[in-house]
Amino acid sequence: MKHFLPSTALAMMIGLGSLTLGGNAAAANKWDSLQPDRDEIVASLNVVELLKRHHYSKPPLDDARSVIIYDSYIKLLDPARSYFTAADIAEFDKWKTQFDDFLKSGNLEPGFTIYKRYLDRVKQRLDFALAELAKGVDKMDFTTHETLLIDRKDAPWEKDQAALDELWRKRVKDEVLRQKIAGKEPKQIQETLTKRYKNQLARLDQTRAEDIFQAYINTFAQSYDPHTNYLSPDNAENFDINMSLSLEGIGAVLQSDNDQVKIVRLVPAGPAAKTKQVAPADKIIGVAQGNKEMVDVVGWRLDEVVKLIRGPKGSVVRLEVIPASNAPSDQTSKIVSITREAVKLEEQAAKKSVLKLKQDGRDYKLGIIEIPAFYLDFKAYRAGDPEYKSTTRDVKKLLTELQKEKVDGVVIDLRNNGGGSLQEATELTSLFIEKGPTVLVRNSDGRVDVLEDENPGAFYKGPLALLVNRLSASASEIFAGAMQDYHRALIIGGQTFGKGTVQTIQPLNHGELKLTLAKFYRVSGQSTQHQGVLPDIDYPSIIDTKEIGESALPEAMPWDTIRPVVKPTSDPFKPFLADLKAKHDARSAKDAEFTYIRDRLALTQKLMDEKTVSLNEQERRARHDEVEAKQLAMENIRRKAKGEEPLKELKKVDEDALPEEDDKTKPEDDAYLAETGRILIDYLSESTKMAKK
């Protein structure tokens, strides 16, 4: 593709009229003079043209899209509606349906004007917060019965600066109270929060025109779908928000979440995953190099946090993390040490184990194959190395070994498998079906490419189940979808991630554009996009699907269908599904692990539904103690059922319950894996009975 710059747009760039808004008589700031340069204007026009010509959906850039861009931009800058006033928004609203025209003409000034007003408002709020702290943390009155609205995404905009002062007085009070309940002393709280706000003020002065351009054009790009991104020259070189922290990182996918950075996914066998102390939806609030002082990163940009986390291979980074399991008002954090390293291919390789279960008076052996990723050593493959490593080759070897051990069936564990090689998803499918299509790829011009297994005969024809969860994504969903559509395996677990789109990177004159240009479909014609793969038998999800997954992302492309390429065949599982579900429900109702997960999810959901918090210390501590007591009781019920000693306090869970890196958990001890095995055994038993009739 070429860089597009229409001649009409060039003409429009000459002598653009100045767009100004009133209502801002603040003293001059360093960012007041920031303006887009010619390279950025050209890049914006190129992005407009590339999206128009090559995005999968090709939606029109019109007034309706302008409203989406505008709303998304305001939400990006002020998601909690705590900086802009109602008067600011009333002024910006005049442009609500004009962003399509601005972008087509290369006029970036409105985006810059709104961003600079945002910087003004942030400075005012931080100055106010520092003034409140300067009065003394120990002077704050926590005996009044005030409350603070913490879920402000739909709150009305505050009418003026005085109303924002009142909101921020409560916000500062809430921050102090959170720190107090987390065990910090007044002097320490005063120092921590003062330093945090001063650091944020200093970072405002470092804002560059490039930062504003990146935020504005990326908001425009993401109005098409969440995986279409503009990357500035710095970000294109250093970090792609949708890729893992690569060779010298911790193996985690991160994203911004208001003023904090949230973990979206852990790379299997990566440094962070190995610690077993961090999880998706955890929030990172501090980063330290080795034994150096912890740097508070609340309010930092994502790319800045990433730069701190990355570092030389073999070095240690410490993260201060607020677990996702905490209540929204609970700031209790923990420190996790991670040694940076590359994720080695052999560590992501498929592994096998044997699950031994006794059921209905008979002993069963089931083969377990864990697949952390769909990998292919492209370099060795292209070089013609006969021993090149790939998921399919490894799984084939493991299946051979398991069949020699005379297993009764096989469970493939795809939990947390974020995908990888599309070729491998197709090749792996070929091991289990006779022959035929494996996945469809529909391009933006409507052309459908069919990827097929052309090798006749299935390598493994025995009983098969797939275990999936919310973090099974992309290539995992293609494989699981094919197994379900061919009725080749029982799909068990949780709804998968739902990423069913294909992106390409297009270089620009300034930065890069990653745009969505195709969509995956199953052989049944169903998209894997948004909905993912729905299991035949559900397990309660450890991960909140409202927080993590394609459907949790704004402007996610919809689920849809196209013409199927495989005619429906008889489903061997269908006659037994109701009975299998009933038996599973009966077992899981008594299982300590399933009970714990269901109870924990119910409590988490209840906590997440709380919209306000008390600013009364006695009430807040009582609520904190109540939640902790419930969590401790749930944990101890589980420990008792497993024959373990109960805990006296919840804080010991992190020290005692997390396995060491070299801990080898037996498959029988994994509740989800064991139950999947039992469901497969139920199917074997029922189908054998029917065959004898």
Image (tube, rainbow, N blue to C red):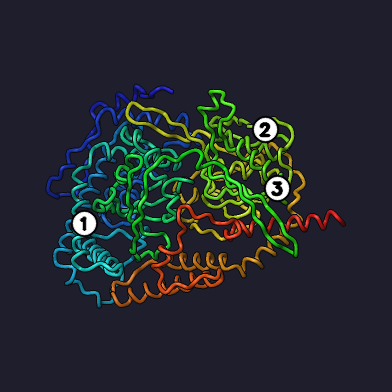
Circles 3 and 1: CB atoms closer than 8 Å: no
Which amino acid type is marked by label 2? Asp
Side of 333 where 399 appears, left or right? right
Q: Which label sits in the foreground, 1 or 2? A: 2
Residue identified by numbered label 3: 405
| Amino acid type of the residue tagged 3 in the rendering | Glu
**Helix, strand or loop for disc 2:** strand
Q: In which quarter of the image is the N terminus?
A: top left
Q: Residue at x 42, y 53 (%)?
A: 275
Reading the image, the residue beneath label 1 is 125
Q: Distance between the residues labelled 3 and 1?
A: 67 Å
Q: Is mark 3 on a helix, strand or loop?
A: loop
Local crowd size for mark 2, using a 10 Å CA cut-off: few (<14), some (14–19), many (≥20): many
Q: Give the mark, 2 or 3, whose residue is nearer the N terminus.
A: 3
First along the sequence among labels 1 and 2: 1
* Marks 2 and 3, how far apart at CA: 28 Å
Residue 582 lies in what quarter of the image? bottom right
Q: Say which quarter of the image contains residue 277.
A: bottom left
Location of the C terminus by quadrant is: bottom right
Q: Mark 2 points at which residue?
A: 453
Percent across and percent down for residue 228 are 43, 38
Query: Residue 223 location, x and y as percent?
Result: 42, 42
Front position in the image: 618 or 118? 618
Identify the residue at horizontal 55%, vertical 39% (top origin). Answer: 374
Is residue 288 shown above or below 13?
below
Q: Which mark is residue 351?
A: none
